[in-house]
Image: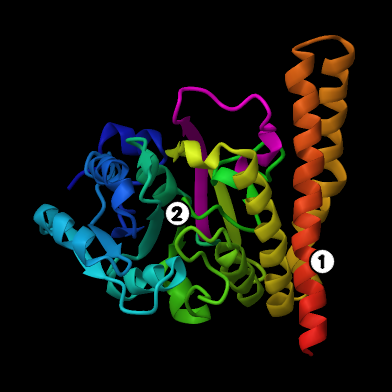
Amino acid sequence: MSPSSEEKRAGLSEDFRPRASVIVCAYSNERLPQLKETIASLQKQTYPPSEIVLIIDHNPELQEELERLASDTLRIAPNSGERGLANARNTGIALAEGEVLAFIDDDAAAERRWLEELVACYQDPGVIGAGGRIEPVWEGGRKPAWLPEEFLWTIGCSYRGMAEGSIRNMIGCNMSFRSSVFEEVGLFNPDIGRLGNQPLGCEETEICIRALERWPGKKIMYAPEALVYHHASLARQTVRYFARRCYFEGVSKVVVRRLQGPAATSAEVGYLSRTLPNAVLREARNVVLLRDAGAAASRIGMTTLGVGAVGAGFAFEFLRGKIRR
């Protein structure tokens, strides 16, 4: 099959056409409408995936419903491990046959050129992973005025101040790896990953660090043109969820530090020391200049709350580990 004009625009050479498998993990019946949009978006890619591997995480009812959609290119299988996103992804990795393995969440939709933009990154032999931009789609129509752009990571989206170019790690909703990465460094660590609505995370961070330690001369790239749209439910647009997500992010960072050492949180130091102070100063100017002052003041408060919640989670898990030892 010859490359399309879109593929040529993405910089894909005619002789570079690796098989690309897309892995999607699902567990909730409530997300079924978004999941069907996910699958539909993958079936319209300008660089068609060689297969879509849909893993159902211990939900027989959902699996039965989705098996009606199965085809030669859409494979549906249950999570062969214990419940949780990491084990579901690992099941998908074991089944996938592509040279490039891409991951997208079950409540996200890929822009038509998403996969071709990710695949284009792998023309550089030094690239072992590539991730793209994640834009929120707000249930209710608009972002909560109190939510700072620097904290959009709490809903799994790209955020102000995140690294670009060659990066340390990707966000799980929009990431890809060479399949050889998993063959060499192993799979996602299920002791870190998300389980249902429990907002632990960082399994993506941990495996990216593992891969870069294995190949110090290689790189993981951020490709902003590889775009997905991530559903931001009303349940994630509450102060309670925000604080809880920040708290468990602090817990997760301690777990990653135990596995990979203090260097594993070096990027977070820069985020705390530069990005967040700049955000507070920006919003303080808005308050002084009476530019939507009420919303700006609320964002200052939420930034303080977010930092405090992350710090509390970090301190609690750090001390708990000390006590256990």
Q: Which residue is mark 1?
A: 315
Instruction: Residue 281: give x, y in percent of width and height.
Output: 88, 28
- In the image: residue 253, left or right of residue 25: right
Instruction: Residue 21: give x, y in percent of width and height.
Output: 30, 60
Residue 225 shows in the view:
no
- Colour scheme used in the picture? rainbow
Span shown in magenta: 128-153
Residue type highlighted by circle 2: Gln
Q: Which mark is residue 140?
A: none
Q: Nearer the viewer, residue 163 or 78?
A: 78
Residue occupying the point 80% across, 71% down:
262
Residue occupying the point 45% across, 54% down:
123
Instruction: Residue 138: give x, y in percent of width and height.
Output: 47, 30
Looking at the picture, does residue 74 appear above or below residue 8? below
Q: Earlier in the sequence, mark 1 or mark 2?
A: 2
Please say whether residue 137 is one of the residues in the magenta stretch. Answer: yes
Please say whether residue 271 is one of the residues in the magenta stretch. Answer: no
Neighbour class for label 2 at 10 Å: few (<14), some, many (≥20)? some
Secondary structure of the residue carrying numbered label 1: helix
Secondary structure of the residue carrying numbered label 2: loop
- In the image: residue 16, left or right of residue 232: left
1 or 2: mark nearer the eye? 1
Residue 56 shows in the view:
yes
Q: Nearer the viewer, residue 215 or 261?
A: 261
Q: Which mark is residue 123?
A: 2
Q: Quadrant of residue 279?
A: top right
Instruction: Residue 10: give x, y in percent of width and height.
Output: 41, 38
Residue type highlighted by circle 1: Ala
Residue occupying the point 24% across, 44% down:
36
- In the image: residue 96, left or right of residue 245: left
What is the number of callouts on the image?
Answer: 2
